[in-house]
Image (cartoon, grey):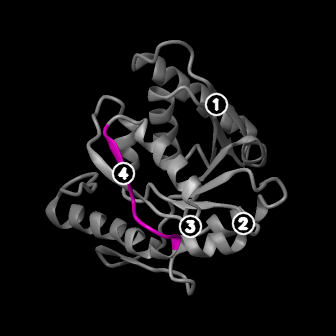
Amino acid sequence: MKIALVGGTGDIGEGIALRWGLETTHEILVGSRKREKADERAREYGERLEIAGRKGKPDMVGLANEDAAREGDIVVLCVEAEVVVPATRSLLGVLHQDQIVVSPAVPMVRRGKYFFYAPPPEGSLAVQIAGVLPERMPLVSALHTVPAHKLADLERPLDQDVVCLGGDEDAKKTVMGLIGEIAGLRPLDGGPLSASCLVESITPLLINLAIANKRKNLAIKFV
């Protein structure tokens, strides 16, 4: 399977690329607005995976965002929340209904020391993105509460839950299966896409808990 990371040179893209590259056999398409930057980061990720003990040469390719989105079976929108909607619109000419789009973005605003959830009028960013995509193209909302820096630290084991939401049950199961291939991540079905606001809002809570309690990279685990 080909996993395309639109904006894959950023923090969350880096973490996802490294973990899926380390622990799965899927081809990772690292996307960027500039092909040269994507190539450079893909090589860097590959070198880090080899150092971490990845057997064989990691299947990591750098591409322009449009090319990555065109070729991917799974398209993960790793761009910042502020620009994810226009970025999605810019890809409409290359996306097709056989793909699955994944949204990990969370809209937040900072007020003084702390962060607050700032959903769009649609109720959640995932629902807003779904409204931009072609009709019947599946969107899965996931990976909101997985700290990017913890993902990127390959020496650090993971032990957390990942809530996945979406209306297309087959697409959701596919994404949950991919997440479950990463050691230490347990995917959980969170229901329909309309419930994405419940999970997106956890991210600023985790950040605020980290700030107030002087902790780093907090995540969630349901017990």
Decide: few, some or many residues near mark 1? Use Cα within 10 Å; few <14, some 14-19, many ≥20. Answer: some
Q: Secondary structure at mark 1?
A: helix
Q: CA distance from mark 3 to mark 4?
A: 25 Å
Please state which of the two labelled residues, at mark 3 or mark 4, is closer to the viewer: 3
Residue under numbered circle 4 = 147
Indicate the amino acid at tag 4.
Answer: Pro
* Kind of residue sitting beneath label 2: Arg
Spatial CA distance of label 2 from label 4 is 30 Å
Mark 2 or mark 1, which is nearer to you?
2
Q: Residue at x 75, y 69 (%)?
A: 135
Residue under label 3: 167
Q: Nearer the viewer, residue 3 or 173?
A: 173
Is 99 in front, or is 206? Answer: 99
Which label's residue is closer to the chain start, 2 or 1?
A: 1
Specify whether 222 is left or right of 4.
left
Q: Secondary structure at mark 2?
A: loop
Magenta region, residue range: 184-193
The Cα–Cα distance between marks 2 and 1, rounded to whole angstroms, is 35 Å
| The C terminus - image quarter | bottom left
x, y percent for residue 197: 44, 75
Q: Quick check: 7 left or right of 143?
A: right
Mark 3: few/some/many CA within 10 Å (<14, 14-19, 20+): some
Q: Which residue is mark 1?
A: 40
| Residue 198 in view | yes
Q: Which residue is mark 2?
A: 136
- Relative placement, left or right, of 183 versus 90 is left
Mark 1 vs mark 4, CA separation in Å: 23 Å
